[in-house]
Image: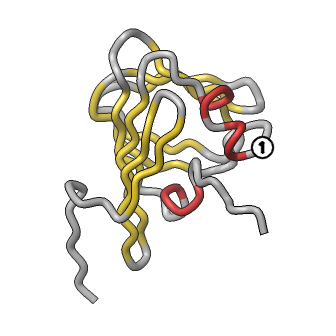
Amino acid sequence: MLEVKTIEKPDERRDFPRGHLDALHMTGLDFAVGTFEPGWRWSESVKPIAKTESCQVHHNGFVVKGRMRIRMDDGAEAEIGPGDVFVVPAGHDAWVVGSEPCVLYDFAGVMAQSYARVEEDA
């Protein structure tokens, strides 16, 4: 099945402290544009929503602008910036570096389904 969508009309938008996610849901792919403002840090902005000690979502992506630092649960660290393609396994914290927002594209199959989604209490 051929599918074409535009991020100008996302299927959903998720707002969280100091950032937001615009997501498209397609067959076999969830695509998201994440915008993270200066001062954003996963452990402060998303951890209360995710209710996990570290981010448990696997990310495949591309950085459009800005910089982000990532620290894995095992202590390994890397910084990503414009033009970088990245694979980040589950089990990490991340934060914006500098005074410019970080904008990235995430192509992970599950990221847009679960990232920063507030679950309704049953």
The residue tagged with tag 1: helix, strand or loop?
loop
As drawn, 78 above or below 89: above
Q: How many marks?
A: 1
Neighbours of disc 1 within 10 Å: few (<14), some (14-19), many (20+): few
Q: Is residue 30 above or below residue 99?
A: below
Between residue 82 and residue 35, name the one nearer to us: 35
Q: How is the image coloured?
A: secondary structure
Left or right: 32 with respect to 118? left
Residue 112, horizontal then vertical, whole percent: 48, 58
Q: Identify the residue under disc 1.
A: 52
Q: Is residue 3 left or right of residue 25?
A: left
Give the residue drawn at x 56%, y 42%.
Answer: 88
Q: Nearer the viewer, residue 76 or 63?
A: 63
Q: Amino acid at mark 1?
A: Thr
**Residue 61 vertical placement versus 110 (above, below):** above
Between 74 and 46, the one lying in front of the other is: 46
What residue do we see at 38% from left, 35% from top? 35
Residue 92 relative to residue 51: left or right = left
Residue at the spot 57% in from the left edge and 51% down from the top edge: 115
- The quadrant of the rendering that contains the N terminus is bottom left
Quadrant of the drawing holding the C terminus: bottom right
Q: Position of residue 58 (x, y in %)?
A: 59, 51
Quarter-of-image position of residue 100: top left
- What x and y, as percent, mark residue 62? 35, 41
**Residue visible at 46% across and 24% down in the picture:** 68
Residue 110 relative to residue 53: left or right? left
Instruction: Point out the residue furthest to the bottom here.
Output: 1
Query: Farthest residue toward the top?
Result: 98
